[in-house]
Image: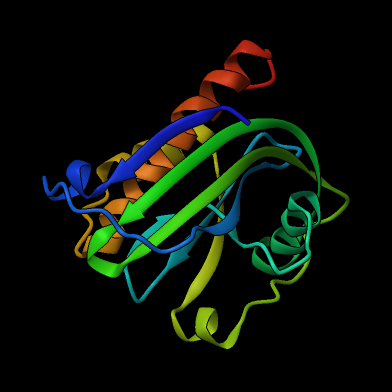
Amino acid sequence: MTIIAAITDKNITGSHALAQTPPRHAVGVVLIDKDMNMATCYGADWDMYTLPGGGVDDGECFITAVKREMLEETGCACEIIGEIGLIIENRAEHDFTQQKYHYLATVVGEKGMLHLTEKEISAGQSICWLPPKEVLKIYTEQQPKTYQQQFIKARDIAVLTKAVAMMENQNNYR
């Protein structure tokens, strides 16, 4: 998978410090429904939108993780239609590293109920379906309040920018 970006403290705080921990592997998805709207997760406790996705369990392949995470966070079965790319994050302040593999996917069948964790429920997580360019605008205008949110914003904007370009190039976008 092609690397979209490597985001470090230098991008966020200007520091050259680097975390030393082994990377967490995760997946993220730009999920499009039949109306060409995109799934975006909203966390009320952070007042922030993020792309759906999450960690890859031990022994789980990325494709299985994508399908599991989409059922949990969006209530939808999905079909992967392309690779968007890899974001490498190195957060020195939290001694955290992550390799997040991003995919473009479409909803298969009907939208169902979310299957959120207790942590996601208590965070007030919900799902919204909006046109991709509107999602990119919302993400660009977000004002991150924390160090972690700044990384998430940088990551998601890089992914969305590439995904919107891919959709425009595939004439599969309105």
Residue at the spot 52% in from the left edge and 78% down from the top edge: 120
- The answer to whether 69 appears left or right of 17 in the picture is right
The correct choice, above or below, for 174 with respect to 130 in the image is above
Q: Quadrant of the N terminus?
A: top right
Q: Position of residue 57 (x, y in %)?
A: 70, 68
Question: In this orientation, does residue 34 appear?
Answer: yes
* 115 vs 91, nearest the viewer: 91
- The answer to whether 160 appears left or right of 18 in the picture is right
Residue at the spot 32% in from the left edge and 66% down from the top edge: 95
The correct choice, above or below, for 162 with respect to 98 in the image is above
As drawn, which residue projects farthest toward the left?
Answer: 14
Residue at the spot 69% in from the left edge and 62% down from the top edge: 69
- The answer to whether 17 appears left or right of 77 in the picture is left
The correct choice, above or below, for 82 with respect to 102 in the image is above
Kindly indicate the quadrant of the structure image that contains residue 58: bottom right
- The answer to whether 65 appears left or right of 129 in the picture is right
Q: Quadrant of the C terminus?
A: top right
Q: Position of residue 171 (x, y in %)?
A: 67, 13
Q: Position of residue 30 (x, y in %)?
A: 61, 42
| Label total for image | 0
Q: How is the image coloured?
A: rainbow
Question: In this orientation, does residue 133 appear?
Answer: no
Residue at the spot 59% in from the left edge and 20% down from the top edge: 166
Q: Position of residue 138 (x, y in %)?
A: 35, 44
